[in-house]
Amino acid sequence: MTTRKNIENVLWKACDSFRGKIDSSRYKDYILSMLFVKYLSDLNKERRAWYTDHFAGDQQWIDRAMSREPFVIDDKSSFDYLYENRSNTQIGQKINIALSAIEERNGAKLRNVFRAIDFNSTVDLGEPSEKNAILKNLLEDFHELDLSPSHLDSSDIIGDAYEYMIANFASDAGKRRRIFYAQPRLGTCGKTCSTARE
């Protein structure tokens, strides 16, 4: 079971990768973006596994059901893909492409959420070798964290993590942007209910 403390520990560890390099009002955006990608990826995997079982592996029905989920994410936008490419010299650009695809595939729900965040920025993250090291560490920090809805000990835990970062790292800067965390929960009949948290 993933607790709020588990998530806060990972967030704090992720902050260590940035401290002394850029201001906390900036690096919290990178960390929260990665938290959100990890959550969407784990949510997507859990839902796909449920539909695979429910539809006895019928790919057509699985794909149809997945296309109707509250959030849609493709393989190359997933956290697992980014983690597998964590040592790639173009990892910053790969993350940017993934975030852009997530925004595009989820329309109005996530439009411009990642607009001000550039994971390929040498201004914020330094020269290529330093930037790549930071991003590799960030991906490794989140890798072991399971954010599948069924593994979270509270339905508000992702929103709580967001508030934790805002409270501890430049809360006034955080007012500039919003991320909605919808945490679908599996019912016994397989239907999804969502709670949005701003």
Image (cartoon, grey):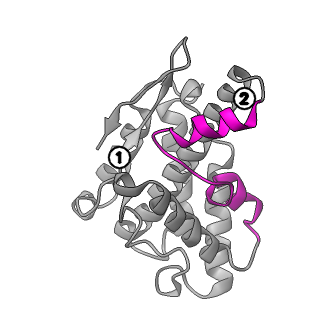
Residue 59 belongs to magenta span: yes
* Amino acid identity at mark 2: Thr
Where residue 67 appears, as percent x and y from the top left, is 55, 43
Q: Please name the residue that numbered disc 2 is placed on.
A: 52
**Rendered-image quadrant of the N terminus:** top right
Left or right side of 128 for 180: left
Q: Please name the residue that numbered disc 1 is placed on.
A: 180
The Cα–Cα distance between marks 2 and 1, rounded to whole angstroms, is: 27 Å
Q: Is residue 62 above or below residue 128?
A: above
Left or right side of 163 for 31: right
Q: Quadrant of residue 23?
A: bottom left
Q: Quadrant of residue 64?
A: top right
Q: Quadrant of residue 47?
A: top right
Could you say whether the residue bearing mark 2 is in a helix, strand or loop? helix
**Rendered-image quadrant of the C terminus:** top left
Q: Residues within 10 Å of mark 1 (few under 14, many from 20)?
A: some
Q: Main secondary structure of the magenta part?
A: helix
Instruction: Specify start and end residues of the magenta stretch as a single range.
Output: 58-87
Nearer to us in this view, 98 or 83: 98
Residue 105 belongs to magenta span: no
Residue at image coords 66%, 28%? 51
| Residue most extreme to the front | 60
